[in-house]
Image (cartoon, rainbow, N blue to C red):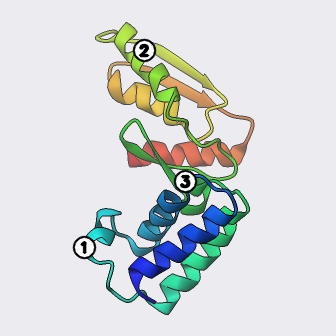
Amino acid sequence: MILENTIKQASQLLKNKNIISHELDAQVILSDIMGVTRDFFITNGHIKVSKNTIKKFNYAIRRRIKREPVAYIIGKKEFWSQDFVVNQTTLVPRPETELLIYKVVDFFKNKRINVLDIGTGSGCILLSILKELDLSRGIGIDISAKAIKTAQTNSKTL
């Protein structure tokens, strides 16, 4: 199947299930599977997509049709200009939470602070604050051992 048609068909399936971000979701999922940026689709819409890629993509689209967040499907979410690993044991970082990071960083700039992140999940809040306030220290805790493991993974990749 041709790349452009692959995206259009998946987008239509998602649209039929009242998923508002249908086209974006299809592009994000396929770009992740193919290991390319979404820009790639603009100039390469005519290329043929492999059967293996189609199989993975169809599975991912079925998950999205069931309203599973795209971040869980692709296993990551961009937050504060960094990609964070996310999964069903963590919440998906929300764009409006970046305002919290901005306010904390602005208020405490050039200061050393200690941060306690209760219910850290992916660790995105704590790790983003510590990235900006490099003199500071922090601890993230969570009731879920799997979430802690995810936060540890994220701390090693930043």
Mark 3 or mark 2, whichever is nearer to me: 3
Is 66 positioned to the left or the right of 1 in the image? right
State which quadrant residue 5 falls in.
bottom left
Disc nearer the start of the sequence (3/2): 3
Where is residue 12 drawn, in percent x and y?
Answer: 58, 69
Q: Which residue is mark 2?
A: 103
Where is residue 127 drawn, in percent x and y?
Answer: 45, 33
| Residue drawn where x is 34% and y is 25% of the image | 132
Alpha-carbon neighbours of circle 3 within 10 Å: few (<14), some, or many (≥20)?
few
Alpha-carbon neighbours of circle 2 within 10 Å: few (<14), some, or many (≥20)?
few
Secondary element under disc 3, as helix, strand or loop, is loop
| Above or below 115: residue 91 | below
Q: Is 56 in front, or is 26?
A: 26
Q: What amino acid does circle 1 point to? A: Thr
| Residue drawn where x is 63% and y is 56% of the image | 19
Q: Which residue is mark 3?
A: 21
